[in-house]
Amino acid sequence: MKASDRDVLLVIDVQNDFCTGGALAVPSGERVVPTINRIAQNFANVVLTQDWHPRDHVSFAANHAGRQPFQTIELDYGPQVLWPSHCVQGTSGAEFHQALEITRASLVVRKGFRPGIDSYSALFENDHRTPTGLLGYLRERELKTVFVAGLALDYCVRFSAEDARKAGLEVAVIEDACRGLDLLGSIAAAHQSFRDLGVSVMSSEAFQ
């Protein structure tokens, strides 16, 4: 298939800290890079997201005495997984993977930069109310179908796909251009959510 001018490739958080050797490595995370680079050639519209946390971010376990990474706490906006400190603003871990071809991107959306709230989705922060501005961009550009790739399938890819679908956009997750963490069945939960919401799951082989 060939992407239309109303399609956008949304590449989620392909950053060093989510790849092998990073602070919050997704298993084989860097393996998405060649696939994303290939399919991006089909798109006139490419958007990248970038986790961009301050050091005192509320989601970092290191900022909660006696807490360990992957424990869950309750915040004003609901449950919050505590993560290892990652993608700290201005660090090498926050940079895009060096092999990711970013020149085709028309927009980079930075998220998670507010100290008191995490942001998995590319469209809304974790209170599900605070917008990143991406939805407005998509609407202004009259982009109708969002193809999602990147890291991690069961967190930031999932939340981004869900929010785009709830906003009335057509959404497809390119599964082999994603990798997941799979914490306590989170990949299976993501797939169930995609089915419930009408999010398509496809292979990059559809793009020739």
Image (cartoon, helix red, strand yellow):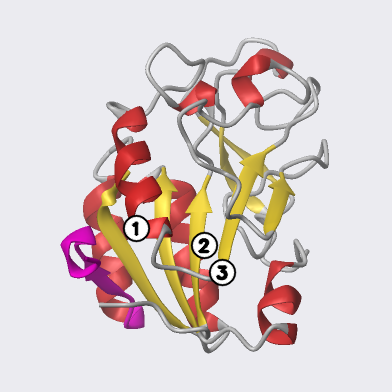
Quick check: 206 left or right of 68? left
What amino acid is labelled 3 in the image? Asn
Quadrant for the C terminus in the image: bottom left
Q: Which residue is mark 2?
A: 160
Q: Mark 1 packing: few (<14 Cα in 10 Å), some, or many (20+)?
A: many
Q: CA distance from mark 1 to mark 3?
A: 12 Å
Residue 84 is labelled as: none
Quadrant for the N terminus in the image: bottom left
Q: CA distance from mark 3 to mark 2?
A: 17 Å
| Residue 200 is a magenta residue | yes
Q: Where are the magenta residues, as a range?
A: 197-208
Q: Residue at x 41, y 77 (%)?
A: 171
Q: Which residue is mark 1?
A: 39
Q: Which residue is mark 3?
A: 45
Can I make out residue 66 in this image? Answer: yes
**Between residues 185 and 74, which one lies in front from this camera angle?**
185
Q: Residue at x 51, y 19 (%)?
A: 69
* 58 vs 80: above or below: above
Kindly indicate the quadrant of the structure image that contains residue 140: bottom right
| Residue 145 is a magenta residue | no
**Between residues 196 and 204, which one lies in front from this camera angle?**
204
**Between residues 22 and 186, which one lies in front from this camera angle?**
22
